[in-house]
Amino acid sequence: MNKSKRTAIIAGMSVLCVGSAATGMTSAAEMDAKQVTIAAKALGFLTTKAPAGAKVVVTAGAAPVAAVQAALPGAAVAAGDAAPGAYAVFVSSAAEGKKALAKGTVTVGNDVACVDAGGCVIAVETTPKVTIYVSKAAASAAGVEFDPNFKMMVTEK
């Protein structure tokens, strides 16, 4: 193989690697069971409590439905898109979060970028330590408030 072909192959592989890395950074991973449990507890600090049998929606790629059902045993958990009347929606992106907020639901994610973009009311990170982020703007858009004592334990943005 001559030098110009080798250089072209290496350059092509570099572009592929950089493109793959950029793609990976734009999409958040699915929430794990620990994140779901922490998010479910955070929902308990809303001043407006969920009614019995409240509808909770899990969008594709946001979290395992079984983990959400286990963390919120009194809720009616379903996979799908945000719908009016849902109490909370677990989302995988800020764009999904903004759609759900427009329908008056509390949005939960695992990426602080979703909170920063105003798409998630709550985001939970567990690495390197547990941090709960709350978006004031998104909470206002969803029409919810948190218990003042809870606000001392979270990072508000």
Image (cartoon, grey):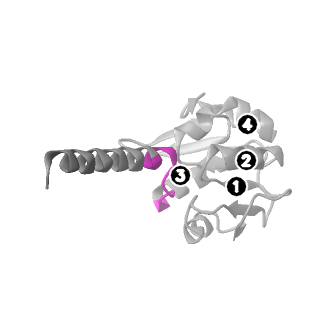
Element under disc 1: strand
Could you give the CA–CA distance between mark 1 and mark 2, rounded to whole angstroms? 6 Å
Who comes first in sequence, dot 3 or dot 2? 3
- Pick whichever of labels 3 and 1 is earlier in the sequence: 3
Point out the frontmost of discs 3 and 2: 2
Image height of 124 relative to 63, above or below: above
Closer to the camera, 98 or 75? Answer: 98
Residue 14: x, y in percent?
30, 45
What secondary structure is found at the residue carrying circle 3?
Answer: helix
Give the labeled residue for mark 1. Answer: 89
In front: label 3 or label 1 = 1
Marks 3/2: CA distance?
Answer: 15 Å
Q: Are marks 2 and 4 in contact (CB under 8 Å)?
A: yes
Quickly name the residue at label 2: 106
* Disc nearer the start of the sequence (1/4): 1
Q: Is mark 1 in CB contact (under 8 Å) with mark 2?
A: yes
What residue would you read off at disc 3?
38
Residue at (67% x, 41% y) in the render: 121
Q: Residues within 10 Å of mark 3 (few under 14, many from 20)?
A: some
Quickly name the residue at label 4: 139
